[in-house]
Amino acid sequence: MALVDGFSHLVIQVTDLDRSEQFYQEVLGLDSVGRDLVNENGPNALLKTNTGQMVLLVQVPEVEPFRPNSNSIHHAWLLTVEQYRRAQERMKAFGYSIEDSREEFRAMGERSMDIYDPDGHRYQIQAHGPEATKIIRPSAGKVSCGKMDDFEVGSVTPFHQEMFFLVRLNEGFLALSSWCTHRNGRLKWEKEHWRFYCPFS
């Protein structure tokens, strides 16, 4: 497997270089390096993140439109929690939504918001807080799960509020925590694959 020392640069096609350069500087906080420094077919602007990675904006006549309801084409940037809070304030000041439309699917401590540039390129801004790896100890107490006959042998029943799965085996019942220990978030039971799945890897 090849070893990568770091991320060098990202090339983004835009239809209006002036408009996009302003967005990437003012909204996303990138620093301008200069114009037309790269041998590209079209006007271009080179910008830099605070950690040294480059973003190259290249002006083209037309940009492939963003596909609605698709998560496959986007870029995700990871910030510290404090950087994320400052980014939220800046985005909100510019009139962008800072809500997380998929908050219910996040692990504890995972923060995320989507920002779109003028051409529809999607950026997922993320941060992972310390609570993501905090050890959560289950609370003690009795839970009424219903009657034994309500559960077929081989069934896996989630108890969301109590945060566990009840598994019916030939030998009896087994209660399994529904929290992933590598990143505090709720596990999913995938019946078709006969497995417990962590979506936070």
Image (spheres, rainbow, N blue to C red):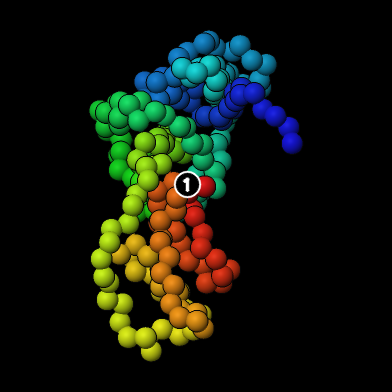
Where does residue 146 sit, x and y in percent of width and height?
30, 82
Q: In this view, does 147 lie above or below 110?
A: below
Q: Answer with the quarter of the image where residue 91 lies.
A: top left
In the current view of this chain or complex, which residue is farthest to the bottom? 149
The residue closer to the viewer here, 150 or 148, is 148
The residue closer to the viewer here, 61 or 156, is 156
- Residue at figure coordinates x 32%, y 86% from the top left: 147
Neighbours of disc 1 within 10 Å: few (<14), some (14-19), many (20+): few
Where does residue 43 sit, x and y in percent of width and height?
58, 18
Where does residue 133 sit, x and y in percent of width and height?
41, 41
Secondary structure at badge 1 equals loop
Instruction: Report which residue position mark 1 lands on.
Output: 182
Where does residue 183 sit, x and y in percent of width and height?
44, 46
- Residue at figure coordinates x 53%, y 16% from the top left: 52
In this image, 189 relative to 3: left or right? Answer: left
Q: Is residue 102 above or below residue 10?
A: below
- Residue at figure coordinates x 37%, y 42% from the top left: 134
The residue closer to the viewer here, 55 or 117, is 55
In this image, 145 relative to 15: left or right? Answer: left
In the current view of this chain or complex, which residue is farthest to the right? 1
- Residue at figure coordinates x 44%, y 72% from the top left: 174
Q: Is residue 24 above or below residue 166?
A: above
